[in-house]
Image: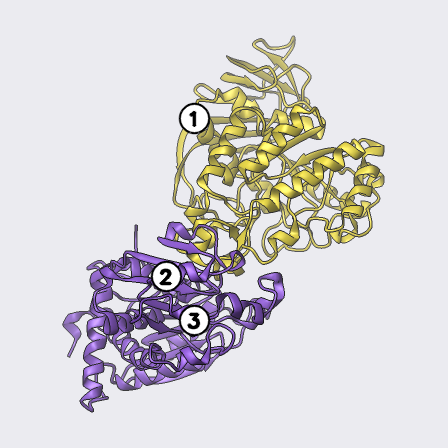
Amino acid sequence: MIETKNTVIRNGRLIDPTQGTDTQGDLYLAGGKIVGIGSAPAGFVAELDIDASGLVVAPGLVDLCARLREPGNEYKATLQSEMAASVAGGVTSIVCPPDTDPPLDEPGLVMNLRQRARKHDLARLYPVGALTVGLKGREITEMALLREAGCVAFSQGDVPIADLQVLYRAMQYAATFGFELRLRPEEASLVNDGVAHDGDYASRLGLTGIPVIAETIAIAQIVQLMRATGCKVHIARLSSGAGIELVREAKREGLPLSCDVAINHIHLADVDIGYFDSQYRFDPPLRSLRDRDAIVAGLNDGTIDAICSDHSPVDDDGKLLPFAEAERGATGLELLLPLTLAWAERNRIALPAALAKISSVPAAKIGFSADLQVGSRADLVVFDPNEAWTVTREALRSQGKNTPFAGMEVKGRARYTFVKGKCVFAL
Amino acid sequence: MYNPQLNAQGELIHLLTTEGLPKRILTQILDRAAEYVAAGEAGNKKFATLAGRSVFNLFFENSTRTRTTFEIAAKRLSADVTSLNIQASSTVKGETLLDTIHNLEAMGADLFVVRHAQSGAAHLIAQHVQPGIAVVNAGDGRHAHPTQALLDMYTIRHFKGDFTKLRVAIVGDILHSRVARSDIHALTTLGCPEVRVIGPKTLIPTGMESLGAHVYHDMAEGLKDVDVVIMLRLQNERMSGAFLPSTHEFFKYYGLTPEKLALAKPDAIVMHPGPMNRGVEIDSAVADGAQAVILPQVTFGIAVRTAVMAIVSENQRGRGAQA
């Protein structure tokens, strides 16, 4: 690993998603910050000189949902392995949900996790605190103290609150302090033992269905509660066209609502399950091709604010099971960039706008600006947008090797990743 | 699309589902079964086809009838048969499904007959067994029950002949039925022009039309002029979970009585995969009546399962190795 040095990144394609700019030039880093663009500040002596000809230089990626499995599930992944995967994927800031074991429902747990993350000194870690104690949906957590401990928002992970009274109070309480909730819209009683999108394909395979109304009813409830409480909400991982339409309406009304989608759901649909391939088991489930098209349209028109990796390292034992018993999720930190670029290329989205979905927009949700301005934090990714590579177990640094994209060729790969001005990854 | 049931020559090496099987293979199985039926009638019940081979019946879900008929079929082929009842569930931490399979492989298994409560279990096993070992699906979750469908096809062919002129109705709990799914695929592949499914909306899965079935909620309408009525077993669990209010109401609206059967063609046959719930989905007067072919189904079932085990074993060994 290279220590923090005065660095010049020469002749790169500088993309600032906050400005929508895409220009050629040099970038100067010192003391953990960007200190010059185009020309060196007075007296600058470069200790590290990187030729970025043909490469994109952009703010480091910000992933709104990545599970690092610590604490509690270290056999699946560790902070060490997943933070290494993170910077290899160009992700410099990770937002992790509270669904660890134990859940992040006490300030001490959060401080401990952040401290261990800092020790690895790779990506920055932003924990989301549990909204209810033990994620059990009964008592609300010490949100204000959790915030002081470093939580950027509050969520239930993948465990929806069954009791609307609790959710109502939780939203009132969060609104008191102006905190944002991250809610995954799912009405649990409609999911029941469902494992796949309730449609033709699940019927054919005899898999128990999860109807779209499980998502839309939950969104409708959240929207009503937002009107009643004024609480800010970020809806995590939409899966259906009907759900996106409800979000679109709520945004039009001016509610403080934002949303994201997982990278997998932009590219995959229920039919990809094929013969019960458990690599395609996700929460929320992969829905129909029509829903996938609606997700792409929602991204293109801005209804969907951000894209997350929904990184979930799962070991082989968790996947070598009948579909309904298999663990959900896939590794994603190292695929966020190439799979976002694939969406952008297919839909003719300019690079600054595409990168905004995985850097500046999620960064703004955490409370910083992911840009290329003098004085801004030197969290950067330098990548070749055209470099093709094959997703293999060996190529992935994450301890989770399972992904439906295994064996596929993707384009776009980080060459250098900088966090706080320090080169933490070089290919 | 790659079909895990077929080898590179397009021959059947596992039987996992009737979906995606070409007509020639379905017909091959039915023809082979006919040979076993004829041989049985001639008093010839034992064949050396699987002599020295080990068949494991793995029943992760309770079954008496299907397991017994597979045992009889394997014994007719002179196989060494071991039946295991493995009451396992995902919630019980223990040996995984694939660990069980690999252990039995190490004991020299040649053919697995598998029943499992999870859809796709047989596919998973077929993907992970060593080359040369055949897998026959004896029912996986709600997904498929291909030997039941094949014995149903055998029965229909036996009594009705040509599939291309038939109207077939499948009645009852379609949602939870692997038999219904496998029957629909087999019937459409064999050229049946009209397959109907009849049941209340709570028991009809989403998108049935995409499987090629016409949906009816009114039994009188659905049974009109059909040649074949396939009744499905209604599990008692359906009364919980708000699928149905009562067996009493179900019987009134979807039970097969002589009056409702009179709406079908006069020579219509009545089938049931068993075990029957008399007074729930079928009236005893129908079950024991002249149009019922439920017992012949059982007899044909042994011949069909014999044929399936013989064919997949031969294809796994390669035709050249066949004695």
Q: Residue at x 25, y 81 (%)?
A: B50
| Chain A, hue in figure | yellow
- What mark, if any, has residue B224 been given in the picture? 2
Depth check, mark 2 against mark 1: the one in front is: 2
Do the residues marked 2 and 1 share a common chain? no
Which element is circle 3 on? helix
Residue type, numbered disc 3: Glu
Label 3 sits on residue: B259
CA–CA distance in space, label 1 to label 3: 64 Å
Which sits in the foreground, A238 or A133?
A238
| Callout 2: chain | B
| A108 in relation to B217, above or below | above
Which element is circle 1 on? helix
> Quadrant where the N terminus of chain A lies?
top right
Q: Position of residue B52 (x, y in %)?
A: 26, 84
Q: Residue at x 68, y 55 (%)?
A: A72
Residue at the outermost bottom position: B43
